[in-house]
Image (tube, rainbow, N blue to C red):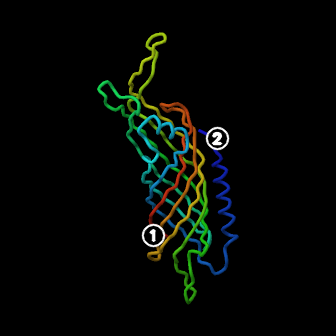
Amino acid sequence: MKNSRFPYVLVALLLLALVAGPGFAQRGQPRADAAFQVRLGYFFPDGDSNVWQDNEEIFTLDTSDFDEFVLGFSFVRSLNNHVEVGFNVDLYSDEQLSSDTEFVDELFNPIYHDTNLEMVPLTIDVRFLPAGRYRVRPGGRYVLRPAFYVGFGAGVNIWEYEEVGDFVFTTEDSPGVFVDEILYDRFKDSGETFQAHVLAGFELPMGDSFGLQFEGRYSWAEDDVDDTYLGPGELDLSGPSFYVGGSFRF
């Protein structure tokens, strides 16, 4: 696991939220409110590291095999009509079966193993709404409007990577004589690493307290993996994700 800067980034974002709220507040704006958001999306890992690339060379495994659903939850607090702070947790898990591309067993059957990746990013972000979330109707009444937002954030990605099943090991049977053996084994590593992201979204009000949400994110994260069949390497956890969800305001 790499040394992470995420505690300092989280503190900086929290301080920004606390300072920006009173500073941006303007007379006549609606009171600050909050929303709980549930998002269902799809994550597309980049696979831009040697662990992914080695797997693609040695096994019948492609980075795109790990394109998978991701479930997200957010608590969003409005600082004013144009700035919000979001606290997010996302849940991703996928398992893929693959086989060795070079070897088969004594009956010419493929040699299979499972590869599993799980991620739980915990992040904080700041969101900017250029046109605001509310508009004023005659009589001074504030109502929700279709809202476009952009933002950035950071946090920690808690991950677990595992390979389990049959693998081919080359061992020395006698001095100078090497043989290939098929053995069952398990390789597993986990950690926490710094993650940053940018986001853009659109929220369509369906009533006073509910809206449909459409959002896209791109996240950057990478960490060291020590326990893999192919040896230590870098595990890229970056990639885009796209969501559809609901926003419940209160």
Quarter in which the N terminus is drawn: top right
Q: Nearer the viewer, residue 239 or 64?
A: 64
Q: Amino acid at mark 1?
A: Leu
Does 63 appear above or below 124? above
Residue position for label 1: 212
Residue position for label 2: 3
Give the distance between the C-alpha atoms of the residues marked 2 and 1, in whole angstroms.
Answer: 38 Å
Q: Nearer the viewer, residue 182 or 76?
A: 182
Does 72 appear above or below 5? below
| Residue 195 x %, y % | 59, 50
Tag of residue 200: none
Q: Amino acid at mark 2?
A: Asn
Residue positioned most to the left: 107
Q: Earlier in the sequence, mark 2 or mark 1?
A: 2
Q: Nearer the viewer, residue 22 or 188?
A: 188
**At 68% from the left edge and 70% from the top edge, which residue is drawn?**
22
From this viewpoint, is residue 93 visible? no
Query: Is residue 118 rendered to the left or right of residue 6?
Result: left
Residue positioned most to the front: 102
- The image quarter in which residue 178 lies: top left
**At 46% from the left edge and 51% from the top edge, which residue is drawn?**
91
- Crowd band around label 1 with a 10 angstrom C-alpha radius: few (<14), some (14–19), many (20+): some
- Crowd band around label 2 with a 10 angstrom C-alpha radius: few (<14), some (14–19), many (20+): few
Query: How many numbered circles are shown?
Result: 2
| Residue 99 x %, y % | 38, 35
Q: Secondary structure at mark 2?
A: loop
Q: Secondary structure at mark 1?
A: strand
